[in-house]
Image (spheres, helix red, strand yellow):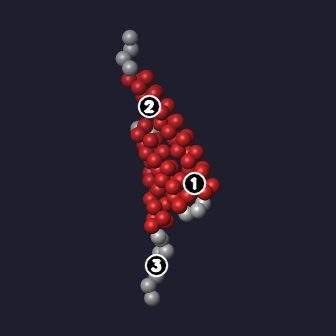
Amino acid sequence: MRHTCGMDAVTLFGLFAVTFMLLCYMMEERAPFWTLLFALGCLMGSAYGFLQGAWPFGLVELAWVVVALRKWAALRRLARRDSEPLA
């Protein structure tokens, strides 16, 4: 008798999405693009939530997309300001 792990394509996508989010979250302090990638991971997590029928999870992940994009924009502004030559 064969034992299957019971993971369909949606479940594998969800596993990838949350693993990707965790990796990006751990790397955020290294460069602003990790925060942008974290936002992408949250978007994938949101899609996973909606695909599996857990719409509250999907909505919360969409909120995290907005939070992460705002953080990324603020980090880019700060980096741009810090790189400007002193007059």
Residue 47 drawn at (x, y percent): 51, 55
Circle 2 is placed at which residue position? 76
Q: Earlier in the sequence, mark 2 or mark 3?
A: 3
Circle 3 is placed at which residue position? 4
- Comparing labels 3 and 1, the label whose residue is closer to the camera: 1
Asked whether 71 or 13 is in front, the reply is: 13
Give left or right: position of 64 versus 38: right
| SS for dot 2 | helix
Circle 1 is placed at which residue position? 58
Residue 31 versus residue 87 in the image, above or below: below
| SS for dot 3 | loop
- Comparing labels 2 and 1, the label whose residue is closer to the camera: 1
| Amino acid at pointer 1 | Gly
Q: Earlier in the sequence, mark 2 or mark 1?
A: 1
| Residue 58 seen in render | yes
Residue 87 drawn at (x, y percent): 38, 11
